[in-house]
């Protein structure tokens, strides 16, 4: 436990000791603002909810989360510090979890900084704050799932660009499997049961519930298992030294 | 000094094998290192020095054979053996975005030190490696020599019983080389030290024993005197140049 904390502390520190953190935070906040108020027509909707805000998250995270996570392991491989880390008296799992939690906390900080959106909705109307809380929780798990996938691709290569592209593609698949325009296409040739099965693999399907204010244990189980599976795959990728 | 249960040597290597694809990087190496010994690991580039060291430190899993450190199998008790070892990897890798102090504190924390013990450990290895002038500098602004010594300080932070140093004098100027050699010699009085080099004078300067390896096999070992003089001639006679020309007759026989 202590080792996980030591690793996470260093990793989080390295976000903020480089421009990565600040560039990421600014871009993230600019884009959430743009998507919510301009593209999402927050004001024109005339309802006190954050639907315009959360609805974009699967797409926004698609690019931003891999960008925040691509260096996690690729950088260790490239700089040779992987050797240092793996010869310390810690288990690989402590390193994997420490790094994962550090980057998850970092995304969490970015997400927390979107609080003005909540304030705006509360000033202009009386939104269901329980629903907003569920939305944030779902958004955090969504980011965690993408981040775990990025950990996995980052562990496979020493090249951050390769890690980035692979994780964007993997996360895109996680979106498209349940994205309506795609499932509508499949209706012509696939049975509804098959479409439902494919859609069950999608983050969109499971994020929907949270947006509606429902914290369903099945949705939580989905995100936790995507994270668990990806981190397990990370541990396998790290055996290749 | 903590008593050990067994009378095993500090480092015991038996018939170690590691292959990468079709290449046998390490091909049946066996040797022991006792406490109080400094073993110089000599060999041409690509002869398997780093690969062997990476198997001692548990970074690579061997394809055959066994490594024990402090009487315990590295594959069976990785954490216990890693605690005994201080390791300077090749090219002295370090987190370049950290300061020297931050990096050493990180290493100390991973070694289970905290509070006063951590502060003392950092102060001790900073002093040993002459780092006090760059303590608050970020590692990517350091010269190669300082970067190297920062990584060496990391290896010494927990006062380990076993030291594995992969080319500890690489990239240092003559004065720094001299200091590091003396440091190794000094540390070798109480610890088991293995260091690799391809600078032959270093063997004379700090080793109690030298092992020459070529193409993954031990071709000679003994004290520098036993190996014969001059050392560079012995070295050339025993190893095959990677240019592939002028293969010495003595090797074929």
Image (cartoon, coloured by chain):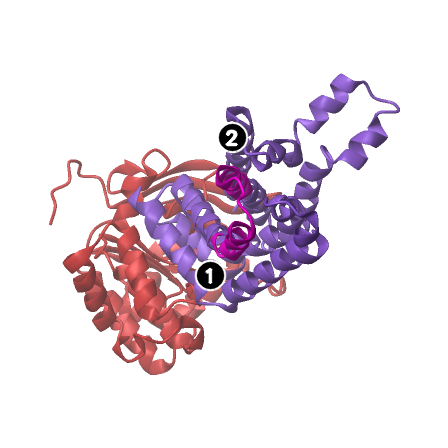
Q: Circle 1 sits in a helix, a strand or a loop, which is it?
A: helix
- What number is the disc on residue B92? none
Q: Is residue B249 above or below residue B171?
A: above
Q: Which chain corresponds to the colour red?
A: B
**Residue displayed at 59% across by 37% down:** A211
Residue at the far front in the pictured view: A125
Residue B152: tell me if it is visible.
Answer: no
Q: Is residue A155 above or below residue B211?
A: above
Q: Could you tell whether B13 is left or right of B20 in the image?
A: left
Q: How far across and how far down the image is residue A42, in percent?
A: 66, 52
Q: Which chain corresponds to the colour purple?
A: A
- What number is the disc on residue A215? 2
Q: Quadrant of residue A92?
A: top left
> Which of the two residues, A171 or A214, is positioned nearer the viewer here?
A214
Between circles 1 and 2, the one closer to the viewer is: 2
The alpha-carbon separation of the residues under discs 1 and 2 comes to: 31 Å
> Which of the two residues, B17 or B60, is positioned nearer the viewer here?
B60
Question: Magenta segment, which residues?
Answer: A112-140
Task: Provide the major secondary structure of the magenta segment.
Answer: helix
Q: In which quarter of the image is residue B99?
A: bottom left
Residue B231: tell me if it is visible.
Answer: yes
Q: Which residue has dot 1 on it? A: A15
């Amino acid at each position: 436990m202590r080792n996980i904390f030591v690793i996470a502390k260093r990793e989080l520190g390295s976000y903020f000791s480089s421009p990565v953190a600040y560039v990421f935070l600014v871009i993230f906040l600019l884009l959430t603002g743009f998507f919510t108020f301009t593209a999402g027509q927050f004001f024109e909707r005339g309802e006190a909810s954050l639907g315009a805000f959360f609805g974009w998250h699967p797409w926004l995270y698609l690019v931003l989360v891999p960008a925040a996570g691509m260096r996690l392991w690729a950088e260790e491989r490239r700089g040779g510090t992987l050797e240092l880390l793996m010869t310390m008296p810690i288990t690989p799992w402590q390193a994997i979890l420490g790094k994962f939690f550090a980057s998850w906390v970092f995304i969490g900080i970015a997400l927390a900084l979107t609080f003005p959106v909540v304030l705006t909705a509360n000033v202009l109307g009386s939104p269901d704050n329980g629903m907003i809380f569920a939305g944030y929780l779902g958004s955090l798990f969504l980011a965690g799932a993408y981040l775990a996938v990025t950990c996995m691709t980052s562990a496979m290569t020493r090249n951050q660009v390769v890690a980035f592209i692979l994780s964007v593609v993997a996360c895109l698949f996680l979106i498209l499997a349940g994205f309506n325009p795609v499932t509508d296409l499949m209706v012509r040739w696939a049975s509804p049961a098959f479409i439902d099965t494919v859609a069950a693999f999608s983050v969109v399907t499971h994020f929907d519930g949270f947006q509606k204010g429902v914290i369903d244990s099945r949705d939580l189980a989905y995100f936790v298992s995507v994270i668990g599976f990806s981190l397990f795959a990370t541990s396998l990728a790290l055996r290749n030294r | 000094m903590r008593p050990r249960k067994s009378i095993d040597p500090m480092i015991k290597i038996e018939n170690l094998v590691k292959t990468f694809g079709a290449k046998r990087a390490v091909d049946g190496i066996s040797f022991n290192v006792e406490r109080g010994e400094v073993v110089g690991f000599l060999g041409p580039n690509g002869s398997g020095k780093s690969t062997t060291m990476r198997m001692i430190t548990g970074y690579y899993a061997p394809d055959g054979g066994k490594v024990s450190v402090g009487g315990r199998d590295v594959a069976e008790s990785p954490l216990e053996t890693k605690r005994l070892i201080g390791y300077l990897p090749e090219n002295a890798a370090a987190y370049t975005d950290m300061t020297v102090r931050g990096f050493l504190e990180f290493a100390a924390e991973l070694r289970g030190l905290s509070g006063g013990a951590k502060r003392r450990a950092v102060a001790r290895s900073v002093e040993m490696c002459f780092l006090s002038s760059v303590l608050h500098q970020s590692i990517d602004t350091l010269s190669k020599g300082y970067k190297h010594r920062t990584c060496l300080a990391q290896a010494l932070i927990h006062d380990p019983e076993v030291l594995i140093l992969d080319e500890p004098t690489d990239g240092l100027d003559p004065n720094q080389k001299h200091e590091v050699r003396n440091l190794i010699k000094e540390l070798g009085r109480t610890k088991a030290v293995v260091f690799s080099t391809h600078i032959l004078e270093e063997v004379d300067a700090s080793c109690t024993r030298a092992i020459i390896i070529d193409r993954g096999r031990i071709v000679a070992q003994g004290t520098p005197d036993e190996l014969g003089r001059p050392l560079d001639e012995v070295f050339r006679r025993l190893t095959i140049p990677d240019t592939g020309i002028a293969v010495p007759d003595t090797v074929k026989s």
